[in-house]
Amino acid sequence: MKLNKDSRKLSRQLFQSSFADGKLDNTRIAAVVESILSAKPRHYLAILKDYHRLIRLEVEKRHAIIESAAALSAETSRAVENDLKSKYGGDLTTDFRVNADLIGGLRIKIGNDVWDGSVRNRLARLSEEINHV
């Protein structure tokens, strides 16, 4: 079901009301969902679906996935985490993963932002440049 303009506007307003002190508040989120489910306005399922999408995107902006070819030392992990928190805020959560396909380097994903400093990515770019010559 396609979301109409009024329903999208309502889901955005509900999303804005879900914050307390600049952060998502689980109590407010639960209250918003409960109020929508009890009132059941027109297209309420589509409104809830869009509201869920907005919440998911906000949560993803506060979570970093850091991939490396080998496990990082505690000191390196702490340094990367501190650097990211200084740029994105102290409430950023991190998830360190090992991905041997990277060959070396790091790949960091925060929301829609991706920084790929892996050897695999560099080799792919080099191969692409060579093929275009």
Image (spheres, grey):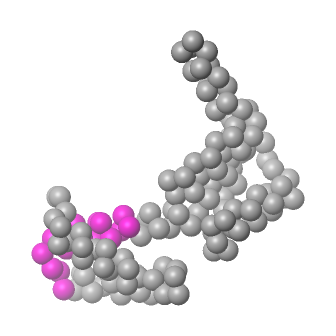
Horizontal side of residue 46 vs 130, given as left or right: left
* Residue 1: x %, y % from top left: 17, 58
Most common SS among magenta residues: helix
* Residue 121: x %, y % from top left: 64, 32
User: Is residue 51 one of those drawn in magenta?
Assistant: yes
Pick out the residue farthest to the front: 133
Q: How many labels, in total?
A: 0
Residue plotted at (38% across, 80% down): 16
Horizontal side of residue 67 vs 80, given as left or right: left
Pick out the residue farthest to the left: 42
Residue plotted at (76% across, 36% down): 104
Which quadrant of the figure has residue 82?
A: bottom right
Which quadrant of the figure has residue 92?
A: bottom right
Residue 114: tell me if it is visible: yes
Residue plotted at (52% across, 80% down): 23
| Quadrant for the C terminus in the image | top right
User: Is residue 124 one of those drawn in magenta?
Assistant: no
47 vs 65: above or below: below
* Residue 118: x %, y % from top left: 69, 37
* Residue 113: x %, y % from top left: 54, 52
Bounds of the magenta segment = 39-54
Viewer-closest of 49 and 115: 115
Viewer-closest of 10 and 26: 10
24 vs 4: above or below: below
Viewer-closest of 87 and 20: 87
81 vs 91: above or below: above
Residue plotted at (52% across, 57% down): 111
124 vs 41: above or below: above
Residue 69: tell me if it is visible: no
